[in-house]
Every structure is written in C-alpha cells, then in structure tokens.
Amino acid sequence: MFCQAASRAGPGPPVEQAFDTAPPGAVKGRLSCAPASGSMDNNFAGGAMGQWIEIKAADGGKFRGYLAVPKAAKGPGIVLCQEIFGINPYIREVADYYAEEGYVVLAPDLFWRLDKDVELGYTETDWQKAFGYLQRFDTDKGMEDITAAVRTLRTRPEVAGKVGALGFCLGGRLAYLAAARSGVDCAVGYYGVTIEKYLDEAAKIKVPMVLHFAAADKYAPPETVEKIKQAFKDDPAVEIYVYPGVDHAFARTGGMHYDRPAHMMAHSRSIALFRRVMGPHYDLSALWETHTMHEFGTRDVDATMKTMVAQPYVNHIPTMTGGVGHDHLKRFYKHHFIPTTPADTKLIPISRTIGADRLVDEMLFCFTHDIEIDWMLPGIPPTGRYVEIPLVAIVNFRGDKLYHEHIYWDQASVLVQIGKLDPKGLPVAGVETAHKLKDEKMPSNTLMKNWAKSEGKS
C-alpha cells in the first residue's frame, strides 16, 4: 500500500552540518543538527517512566537498555531502535510515549561495542561524535543485539503477547532489518536510511510493516523510496507513506525539521499497525461515553479529568475555547464549561467512526440558550432560544485515556438560531441544517441562487 500523507507545514530554515565522506551503509549529504524540545509534544506527560536493564549479547558480554513499562504493568513489547545519538533523552521520551500507549518498550544501547553509555545532544560537537559512531557501526552486529533485545523482551514478565520493532533514521533501517532477521511480529520505520541497500532481504519479511518517508529527505530521496516501493508492490502487508513538504527527522520533536501534522499522522498510522497486530485493544466508544457522561450527566470535573491523560487538551474550533494541559483544562471545565452548559443539553447520535487511536462522533447538539455559554457563545446574554446544531467531535486517545478533543460546529447557524445573525442575503442557515442532517430528503441547494439556472440541463 503506497500513500501520500498531507502535511501543511514545510521545513524550517536549515541548520546543517556537511560531511564529505560516508561509511559503508551511510548516506552522503547533510544532516540537520537541531536540539530536541525535551518532550514528545506539548501535551506529553513527560518524566521518566522507565529504568535501565541489562541485556545479554549473543556473542558474550552485556549491554544496557532503557525499559519503559505502561501503567497497566503489562503489554505487548516494542524494541526501539535508536538514531545515531545513542539512547539520549529524546529516545527515552519516545519509549515513555509508547509506554503511555500501552506498550513495554526496550531501547537497547546499540553503540555499546564502540563506547560506554552513549547519550549525545545535537550540538556540532555531538554531531561529529555521532557521525564517528555511525562510521564505525557494524550493522550485522547491531542486528544481533536487536535480536537479543527481542529475546529479552519476550522473557520479561511485563510483556504479554507479541513484540514489534520501531526505529528512526539509522533505527528505521534497523527496524526494517528486524522484520527480516530478528523474529519480530511487525515493524515500523521512520525515514530509514540505506534500506535500498538491503532490499535483497525484502523477501524474508513475512510480517506487517509500515515505513514513513519525508518527501524532501536527502537521505531517502524519491528515487530511493520508489525502489523500496517496487520491492513491496505485491505485498499488501507493507504500507509505505510519503509526507509532502517535510524533511528528514520530521518526527523528532524540537528539531529544525519537526512537523507536528506529519508527526501525528505518522504516529496514528504506526499505532494502527501495532494495535492491529499486537494490541492492546481498548473500547474507545465506552471510554468516550464515560467521559461525556461526566461532562453532561454527573457534571463532575474531577471524574472528567480522570478519563484523560496527564496533560490533555480540548479545542472548540469555532470559538477557540478549551484548555491545554491539566491545570488549564481543569480550570476551563470547572469554571467555564460544565457550569455554563444549559441544563437541558441533549446529544443525539448520528454516526460514530472508530479507528485505532481516535473516534469521530457526529451528533446533534441541542439546548436552550438560558445561560451565558462561555465556551460556545461567550459574552452573549441568554436569549431563551432553543438551538439544534450538527456537531462533530474528533477524539484522540493515548492508550485507554483521552488525549485531545477537536470539536467542530457551524457557529453561523447557532447565531442565526439565537437571533444574533440575520441570515438574509448570507449563505447561512438556522435550524434547517439540523433538520436536513436527520432527513436527507429535505430540499438541497436552497441557498444557491444559481440552482434554478441548471433546471432541465443534462
């Protein structure tokens, strides 16, 4: 399956380090050296969730790995394959991020044969060190160590079920090879470099795999991605996505090329694969209904917050109301949402679509405007008018908790229905939008003056 993934934001101005020579298995070109932000995204709970453990190498010796465990204390396993900067704070945050999604994540130190406890940042000096490690890195030995990490995960009491691989940059290549060599049950690779040099191993891959590439990536340019696509063109279990307008490392938060829309789209696709192959499986519909019950039924702020991740956010798109982070959102719920929502509010379900990590709820939102509604009609005194509007909620989950809500409705229709907007001469409608949602046979195109001109035309 080969797809183009839309992304509206392009890369920022380059902050790069040039290199003139590349070792076997490396990509010649230029490498961005921007610092990470210190958190996976602005709404990640952050904070270490893991510990260092010991992994036994197949050829003798021991090396460390960072193990992150979900709050449930059990889950499927993921071996996280590093970038060229070692098991640094960014990689540990990725591990914690996926632990919050319900996985037991092990990030093995793949540079242990070269140096002890490599943890680099993104300064020029660190980059030079990182490239030096890449020049000396033995891919075959690295794959033996990844296989040892897979074996270690399968013996851990926290791991329930299957084990997958996930990797970025150098790790994207290694995740691909893990699907061929290490006995994982699935694999996800982000902008993997030099995969095209290992396409002779494509036939060995018998497990589902997702590969993400950046359209502007010099290390995996379009002609390289096309070779990879051709190698898997007859394999429906391999999904290859290309993200327009973004560059290498678009998922590294805080990096010069970080692109949040592409990152979140890619993450959803990655989670979809892991959920489908390994689980864990959550009843997102039930989780959402519990959340809305506390919002509109029990009207319990604390119970509402308990259904969400540690640092969630809510955005009511038409009015830009809501909150980002626990404290900001709790303040919003406590003082401006729950107490200012009319008592007769009713949600009438129209449709519900459930994916791997999100739910789309289409409904009619019905209420009497008998109180100033801070979040929907801020600053407008109650009019006593009854309102029915189509409303769509796009709800994202992280594990078994709500992560964020994007809520959409037609604000013009609300203003028409409460008498604050005269629809005459404007392409807007009142309660008719709700009526037509319930009955599609109602007349269409009533706001189009030109509709009559096409009468009788083929």
Image: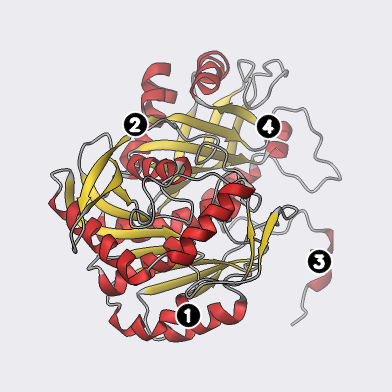
Q: CA distance from mark 4 to mark 2?
A: 25 Å
User: Please, what secondary structure does the residue beneath circle 2 have?
Assistant: helix
Q: Are marks 1 and 2 in contact (CB under 8 Å)?
A: no
Label whose residue precedes the other's in the sequence (3 or 2): 2
Q: What residue did someone put label 2 on?
A: 290
Q: Position of residue 203 (x, y in %)?
A: 32, 85
Q: What residue did someone put label 3 on?
A: 452
Number of marks in the image?
Answer: 4
Residue kind at label 2, given as amino acid type? Thr
Q: What residue did someone put label 4 on?
A: 319
| Quadrant into which the N terminus falls | bottom left
Q: Position of residue 233 (x, y in %)?
A: 44, 85
Residue kind at label 1, given as amino acid type? Glu
Q: Quick check: can you spot residue 327? A: yes
Residue kind at label 4, given as amino acid type? Thr
- Foreground label between 3 and 2: 2
Q: What residue did someone put label 1 on?
A: 196
| Label 2 environment density (alpha carbons within 10 Å; few <14, some 14–19, many ≥20) | some
Quarter of the rendering containing residue 146: bottom left
Q: Identify which residue is drawn at 41% across, 30% down.
A: 47
User: Please, what secondary structure does the residue beneath circle 1 have?
Assistant: helix
Q: Identify which residue is drawn at 55% across, 13% down.
A: 335
Residue kind at label 3, given as amino acid type? Ala
Q: Nearer the viewer, residue 144 or 306?
A: 144
Q: Nearer the viewer, residue 156 or 456?
A: 156
